[in-house]
Image (tube, grey):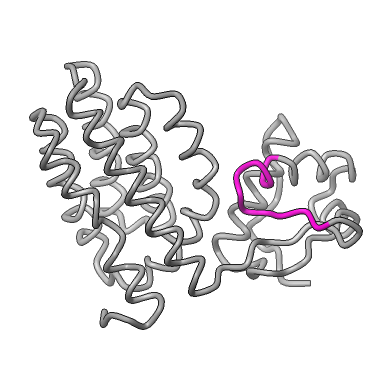
């Protein structure tokens, strides 16, 4: 088993906390894509019951980071070249629609909410907290989707969040300076907050394509 240094459980709500800890371990490479997650071993590792681990795995199944295979168990999802392309297409499709709708509906409260996430991103970039910046990157887009006002769009995006987190983790290797991630998001923030729906849609439409091309070897970092 890989080392679990830095992944101890310290807070209440054990199922949710175990899920967060497992997610962190997956995104930092402690558990690799395609690796089997054995309930008994995880329970021993984190000092909780198998029932707690079982509940935590269900959280991650819902988030799309873990898949359950009948009679085989739970596995970290694998990300193939085709998966990267699919995730990129789906993200750009949902995020561009969300950005357009958000720009059409944006009000002062929405502007403050989205700008607040961006400010947290700036702080994380300045402090070079790459793991936190990755999570805030997804939170930024989740907030845009929420501001769209479409429940169905939010439901669809929720199913993509686990794979999207893995995508962001893979793409992070191509950004030597965290500020580059901020520079990528500032124009989208400006377009949405100014109510420019067409520009917001266009910016978000190809937001992930360069990263997908680099991950699959079709582009140069």
Taking the spot 68% from the left edge, 61% from the top edge, the residue there is 76
Whether 196 is drawn above or below 132: the answer is: above
From the top left corner, tell me how far across and down residue 22 is, in percent. 67, 52
Residue range in magenta is 59-69
Q: Is residue 187 magenta-colored?
A: no
Residue 4, quarter of the rendered image: bottom right
Quarter of the image that includes the C terminus: bottom left
Whether 54 is drawn above or below 175: the answer is: above
All told, the count of numbered labels is 0
Q: Is residue 66 magenta-colored?
A: yes
Taking the spot 29% from the left edge, 45% from the top edge, the residue there is 121
Quarter of the image that includes the N terminus: bottom right
Question: Viewer-proximal residue, 27 or 207?
Answer: 207
Taking the spot 62% from the left edge, 44% from the top edge, the residue there is 20
In this rendering, would 41 be left or right of 201?
Answer: right
From the top left corner, tell me how far across and down residue 44 is, in percent. 87, 55
Taking the spot 49% from the left edge, 74% from the top edge, the residue there is 81
From the top left corner, tell me how far across and down residue 185 is, in percent. 21, 49
From the top left corner, tell me how far across and down residue 26 is, in percent. 61, 60
In this rendering, would 36 be left or right of 204?
Answer: right
């Amino acid at each position: 088993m890989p080392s679990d240094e830095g992944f101890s459980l310290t807070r209440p709500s054990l199922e949710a906390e175990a899920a967060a800890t497992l997610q962190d371990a997956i995104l930092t490479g402690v558990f690799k894509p395609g690796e089997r997650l054995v309930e008994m071993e995880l329970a021993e590792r984190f000092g909780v019951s198998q029932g707690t681990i079982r509940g935590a795995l269900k959280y991650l199944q819902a988030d799309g980071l873990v898949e359950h295979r009948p009679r085989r168990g739970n596995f970290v999802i694998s990300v193939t070249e085709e998966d990267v392309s699919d995730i990129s297409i789906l993200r750009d499709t949902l995020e561009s629609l969300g950005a357009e709708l958000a720009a059409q509906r944006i009000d002062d409260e929405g502007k403050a909410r989205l700008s607040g996430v961006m400010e947290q991103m700036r702080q994380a970039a300045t402090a070079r907290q790459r793991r936190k910046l990755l999570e805030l990157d997804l939170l930024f887009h989740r907030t845009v989707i929420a501001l769209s006002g479409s429940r169905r769009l939010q439901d669809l995006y929720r199913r993509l969040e686990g794979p999207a987190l893995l995508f962001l983790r893979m793409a992070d290797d191509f950004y030597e300076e965290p500020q580059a991630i901020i520079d990528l998001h500032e124009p989208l923030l400006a377009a949405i907050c100014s109510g420019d729906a067409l520009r917001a849609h266009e910016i978000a439409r190809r937001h992930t394509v360069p990263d997908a091309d680099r991950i699959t070897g079709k582009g140069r970092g």
